[in-house]
Amino acid sequence: MTAPATTPTHPLLDAHAGVLDEIRQALASRGWYSRYPESPSPRVYGESAAADGLAAHEAHLNTAYAVLSTQPTDGSVVGSEVSPYGPTLGVTYPALDVDAGLAAARAAMPAWRDAGPQVRAAVCVEIVDRINRRSFEIANAVMHTSGQPFVMSFQAGGPHAQDRAIEAIAAGLVEQERVPTSVVWEKPGRDREGNPAPTRMQKDYRLVPRGVALVIGCNTFPTWNAYPGIFASLVTGNAVVVKPHPRAVLPLAISVEVAREVLVEAGFDAALVQLAPEADGQGLARTLAERDEVAIIDYTGGPTFGAWLEESAAAHGTLVYTEKAGLNSIVVDSTDDLRGMLGNLAFSLTLYSGQMCTAPQNVYVPEGGIDTDEGHLGFDELGDRLAAAVGRLTGDDAKAVELLGATVNDQVRSNADSLASIAEDAGGRVVLDSRRVPHPAWPDAVVRAPGLVAVDVAREDVYTQECFGPVGFLIRTASTEQSLAQLADTVREHGAMTAAVYSTSEAVLDAARDAAAEGGVALSENLTGQIFVNQTAAFSDFHGTGANPAANAAYTDAAFVANRFRVITSRRHV
Amino acid sequence: MTAPATTPTHPLLDAHAGVLDEIRQALASRGWYSRYPESPSPRVYGESAAADGLAAHEAHLNTAYAVLSTQPTDGSVVGSEVSPYGPTLGVTYPALDVDAGLAAARAAMPAWRDAGPQVRAAVCVEIVDRINRRSFEIANAVMHTSGQPFVMSFQAGGPHAQDRAIEAIAAGLVEQERVPTSVVWEKPGRDREGNPAPTRMQKDYRLVPRGVALVIGCNTFPTWNAYPGIFASLVTGNAVVVKPHPRAVLPLAISVEVAREVLVEAGFDAALVQLAPEADGQGLARTLAERDEVAIIDYTGGPTFGAWLEESAAAHGTLVYTEKAGLNSIVVDSTDDLRGMLGNLAFSLTLYSGQMCTAPQNVYVPEGGIDTDEGHLGFDELGDRLAAAVGRLTGDDAKAVELLGATVNDQVRSNADSLASIAEDAGGRVVLDSRRVPHPAWPDAVVRAPGLVAVDVAREDVYTQECFGPVGFLIRTASTEQSLAQLADTVREHGAMTAAVYSTSEAVLDAARDAAAEGGVALSENLTGQIFVNQTAAFSDFHGTGANPAANAAYTDAAFVANRFRVITSRRHV
């Protein structure tokens, strides 16, 4: 009466079984693990990789993205991407016919569901491997949609994003494997004569997807922030519709193209991954989010639409994972490596002009200043030293633009222009104005170096809202104790993706750990080298905590994957 | 610079380490596991246990529940419980001062958080062990609040509920243990001379609770449906406020009393578990749900308030686990054990007068009838045979009341009275009217045996709403194929906690498994013995699936626990 337990087979499972073992183990240990080399060096990716990637990118420009025409479409096209470096991309994409697309997604799921978690994971790994081969092409696409500098576009948009994809696959795989396929349940008992007469039942546990998963991409990290949701949903059996930011379509179009290609080669339906590009202002995310077929939403973007999603989707019983905005915070108490600290902080403020969701904004410094290996520094002195460090890092235009990239939108540019008025309104001081950096190669790019404004801790009106882009606040507090309390309070209330502390005192570090636990934010301590507060490593660092308003989830913990599938039991006497 | 990894120690951890091992393993295997004997036999619980429990119950009657006066209270008392068997309980409870109670809950959490998952699990096991010792007292309290018959009150309100508590503890423990306490992350690298120069960081992972957890109890299963949420939240570090149904306070008052007692003995703050009793109609659940301190809500009850909770709480970022209402469904196709099938079905319909969230309501039978080991039976014949089986089971008043218990509220009584009008409106037939059964011991109890109405499958208006209590529908379909399609469709749309199928055909059973997967409901196949569709076993059967509108969660899977705590990383170079 019972179906035989079958071992799943698939050529890709044969090919990637070893990888699945590796990533299961890496996830459990949380030690260092990376599948994809982060160096864009020709020694790693091949002598012609960079040129080939650029050529592939250029071949997309001013063309219709034809390969996606296998998706259901009404024939209309969209596409209005303009590089933050200046050029119009000119790529057009076929609009997804939403009714037909969602129907196709649903129809594709049963075979994908029945393939089981291991086969799904192997297919997903193959997709990411094949995405990796197009890293240079994607890097160019990320650069010319997000405005990231090229090396960052390569790393964050390529291997680092791919490692996060693999992490999500691992988390989803392991989570599904925790539920046995089948068990014989034997309840002890006796018959009327007192002889053992157990009740035996076979119980089969079948994993089922929730439905269609919608992934809403963002402008600044089109791949890095989309891959975790895409692969977490896909590996758990759901079909995925990817709705890219209208200004950052190309990197996800390439990714979706690869996914569909691999799915078909592997014997599955391409409709398991579809791209839903939209014209700027079309509101397609809202349309899709309200569809009954959509059961899961992953979102990275502004807090207003994020909050709407959380409320509206809950009314439909939809799972929603959001990453919105926050006040990334640093407490400076003391250091035994002033140069290292200043260099590290300056880099964190500078990288991509502070346009990372993890870039620091609020730097708390006690009014009495701090002790350092170069002697005591007053509050203003420390500010000036930090400004000088930023100045050194960004003083040379050609080198600076390779760190700063280009500003992604007018809001960022407006924030960069507002330092003097912020300082004036707040009775503060512009410690460093945001320099306009001419880009030697891309004259139309608007590049801004970070600026710093010193304000008093009392002026919460100034620094408890996110000021996205190259703007940092040096916040004058009465003491490190107050700095830590303010960190905990503002993060708990307004959210943060990252926090850091500099101190030579074990007591202060302990207090900082408590403040981070209270605020619900991950803490980096005394970073003075080549690890930066803005960066997290897949398989080891969680990105976000889900414990403060900045994000209701973390890449990638069990909570991010456990609810993307459900278990259906069937039981019978045996 | 790094805190030494400490092994948690606590006398209760020494005492229960073996249990924790057992339950970790039981949860992973999903085989049979029970910590608490389900038999109320004197040989198991002691010769005087039943009498002592009854005496303890009677000592509560017409008194103030004084032991809870250690909770913050404004001095007012509430309490209006009336037994479905007739008597007024007369127990009064001190109202919780909400502001002070929530403040106390928050203040109690840091020490509980820092105790770590193993100590918390051990303390929780001790609480449940001590609750188990009061099983007979709780059984009387459950009987006289829910109206369950005594043996069921003992089993479902006692050991079975306690096993579900242990299961939640196990799930929460294992989930937390999946995150390592600490790891050294070592990223390979080389210095400028090309020598190996790895980057090494220590990362500590600290588990933090989300906040105060609110558990909203129900009238029919005050302990069974409350314990999973209570212990899942408690073991993951949260403080819990238990808001019992105003007509079923006593079982949870006793449970909370025990929890507080054990917590204090174990060196923790009693405020980690508090009771928030309310007067009927006071709306305290809403008040509590809207408080910022409340981060998690577990709810069992009606769909209207459940839906409000899901929407309102999401707007606050609160996690909400709900179990509401559904259409439990059975497809009858054929059987090789007609007597067994009829007996099993009759029992499932009869037990507690169908007032279980898992009791069957919709029984689909093809109009052409079914093949059985006693020959072919027409649709009407099958109905009559089922009616006769119910009649045999409930024909003797004294025996019947020990299965039926008492009706819990006027809605159930009204539903029981409505069979004739339902049949008339629907053009159907009353196959069996709901008999009023006089209770030999409790003359004021309103006891109703199950009734059955035959209706056509087209009359969805009749059977696609929950008709809670002793009402079953025999739904005439064109074929088993239509029965299964209708099961899948109605469950997906309206929800269900359980489903079952009877068939001698492997093809039909396979199709039923697919229909159950489509509808998102657990399936019992060909139950003809002493396992019933209404019953689930802790550690093996999930209660609910989270895959249909009846409940957004399951007792107890990873998704039920993984998001009740968060992980805060701190990292530093080493």
Image (cartoon, coloured by chain):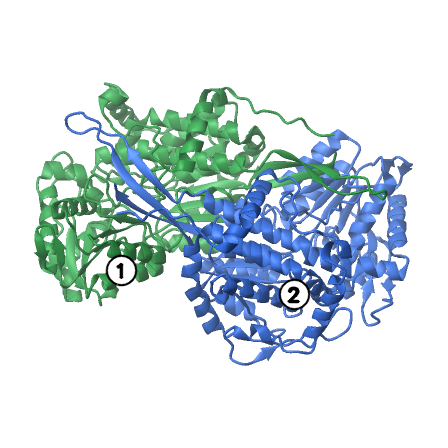
Chain colours: A green, B blue
Q: Secondary structure at mark 1?
A: helix
Closest to the observer, B64 or A541 = B64
Number of numbered discs on residues: 2
Write the residue at 28% across / 27% down: A136
Q: Which residue occupies 64% across, 68% down?
A: B249
Work out whether residue B541 or residue A418 is closer to the camera in this orientation and state it.
B541
- Determine which quarter of the picture holds residue A527: top left
Residue B553, visible in the rendered structure: no
Report x, y in % for residue B238: 47, 58
Q: Is residue A258 above or below residue B171?
A: above
Label 2 vs label 1: CA separation? 44 Å
Q: Is residue A429 left or right of residue A141?
A: left
Please give the residue where the numbered disc 2 appears in the rendered image: B251
For badge 2, the amino acid type reads Pro
**Crowd band around label 2 with a 10 angstrom C-alpha radius: few (<14), some (14–19), many (20+):** many
- The residue singled out by tag 1 in the image is A484
Using the image as rendered, state which of residue B362 and residue B91 is in the foreground. B91
Subunit that carries the residue with mark 1: A
Residue B168: percent from left, percent from top? 57, 51
Q: Is residue A64 visible from the viewing direction of this image?
A: yes
